[in-house]
Image (tube, rainbow, N blue to C red):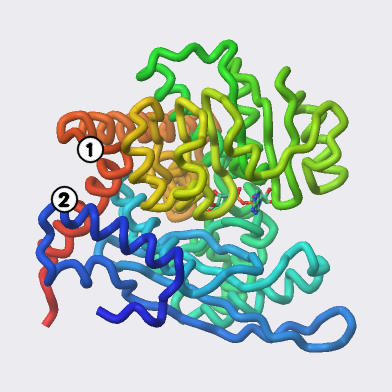
Amino acid sequence: MELHLYDSPTFRMACQQFDLVADFMNIPETARDRLKMPKRALSVAVPVRMDDGSTQVFMGYRVQHHLTLGPTKGGIRFHPEVTIGEVAALAMWMSWKCALVGLPYGGAKGGVTCNPRNLSSGELERLTRRYTQELIPVLGPQVDIPAPDVGTNEQVMAWIMDTYSLQIGHAVPGVVTGKPVLLGGSLGRREATGRGVAYLVSRAMDTLGIQAQGATAVIQGYGNVGSVAAVSMAKQGIKIIAVSDAFGGIYNPQGLALNKLNDHVAATRSVVGFPESEPITNEQLLLLPCDILVPAALERQITEENAAKIQCRILAEGANGPTTPEADAILSQRPEIFVIPDILCNSGGVIVSYFEWVQDLQSFFWSEGEVMDKLFRLLEQSYMQTLNHARKNQISMRFAALSLGIKRVHEAKAMRGLYP
Ligand code: NAD
């Protein structure tokens, strides 16, 4: 099937991964396009009145990958490099992720091509509201439920909830997750992805027999996922020796003082220039010797260029799609590196988003302890299923996770049949 609408390095990468797993699972050619190609995509022009009085038009997208198991679910990204192909790839990964951890959702993703750092708060609000307005025909608590991703946060989710609710005529908290708690958000949602990463890192250390005390970690991307993962791993006794963001990285072999670093980031909006450290580039950071390497920024960071040179014991993929299939082939020759694949590693975010949606539908809210307990139980089950599947079939953790997720969607489509 022609891919031209979505053609981009990231979508080709998602398709390549899918085809490798489909070969392994002997999925017939006739079933592949039905599983792979996104069900719906909406592309919208988003005109925004800027503070200087001019009007600027931004491109926005929403891709819903499959509708077989329930509404679709997935984050919204505000970033200068957003394309419909990237959004489609991220939607496909969301499908396999939701199926892997057993959530009643198909995958979706959305994005607006913009640089949110260059927008004033008023411009960001107008952009978010107009984008939401354009998406209204395809959104809803039983249709498609957005959440935060790169460049978006609780405030953006609150504007989405408000814009949608104004159209419907009453408050509809279940249309979006990752909202402020006061508006029907879930306790623990903001921290869920990073805490989930740290939980799975500790399970991988158990599997490998690595002690947390004295272990070292390096984190690419010090945003929501990376910073919470850092703090959670530090609580386990792991030393965070380097972190980075889009502006550069910092390194201190003695371990970074995260409390002070978080104050520095709050004041300057970057890790760069943190006093108790030396500067390091993102490329150098990925090659540092460490026990745990956490890519928590964007796709395609571990590539055929650097996969042979990374020096970690555990590669914990906080980001979506950080490792290319070419890099995977190299890593498969390096059994000393244990990969926690993205669709498992960062699934804590969508798991607690699901809990938030359930709480909104019931108007009955849980304590943070309940949320975390349910999160860790689901992660534990998914980790053990993936590990056992990998061991039994002598396949990589990524292959195991993808094949479990794809199998469930494949079977569900077969059970529902083809209409008409
Ligand atoms: P965020 O916007 O909060 O943080 C992203 C961070 O990455 C920022 O610090 C940014 O400066 C940095 N960054 C951007 N480009 C970089 C580069 N080239 N090199 C190094 N750092 C760079 O976003 P987030 O929500 O933390 O998302 C990070 C990753 O985690 C994304 O891949 C996202 O899809 C994935 N993810 C997020 C969630 C969630 O709940 N937020 C859930 C699952 C997966």
| Quarter of the figure that contains the N terminus | bottom left
Tell me the kind of residue under disc 1: Ile
Residue 172 x %, y %: 53, 65
**Quick check: 300 left or right of 24?**
right
Q: Is tag 2's residue or tag 1's residue first in the polypeptide sequence?
A: 2
**How dense is the environment of label 1, judged by Cα within 10 Å: few (below 14), some, or many (20 and up)?**
some
**Quick check: 151 left or right of 21?**
right
Element on which disc 2 rests: helix
**Quick check: 157 left or right of 42?**
right
Residue 302 x %, y %: 49, 46
- Taking the spot 47% from the left edge, 27% from the top edge, the residue there is 201
Quick check: 171 above or below 356?
below
| Residue topped by disc 2 | 24
- Taking the spot 23% from the left edge, 46% from the top edge, the residue there is 404
- Taking the spot 74% from the left edge, 69% from the top edge, the residue there is 124
Q: Nearer the viewer, residue 27 or 351?
A: 27
Please say if the residues under marks 2 and 1 sit with CB atoms less than 8 Å apart.
yes
Q: Is residue 364 visible?
A: no
Q: Nearer the viewer, residue 346 or 304?
A: 304
* Residue at mark 2 to residue at mark 1: CA–CA distance: 10 Å
Q: Quadrant of residue 35?
A: bottom left
Residue 171 x %, y %: 58, 66
| Residue topped by disc 1 | 395
| Quarter of the figure that contains the C terminus | bottom left
Element on which disc 1 rests: loop
Q: Quadrant of residue 94?
A: bottom left
Residue 146 x %, y %: 51, 62
Q: Is mark 1 within 8 Å of ligand 1?
A: no
Q: Nearer the viewer, residue 326 or 262?
A: 326
Q: Is residue 379 visible?
A: yes
Quick check: 381 above or below 272?
above
Tell me the kind of residue under disc 2: Phe
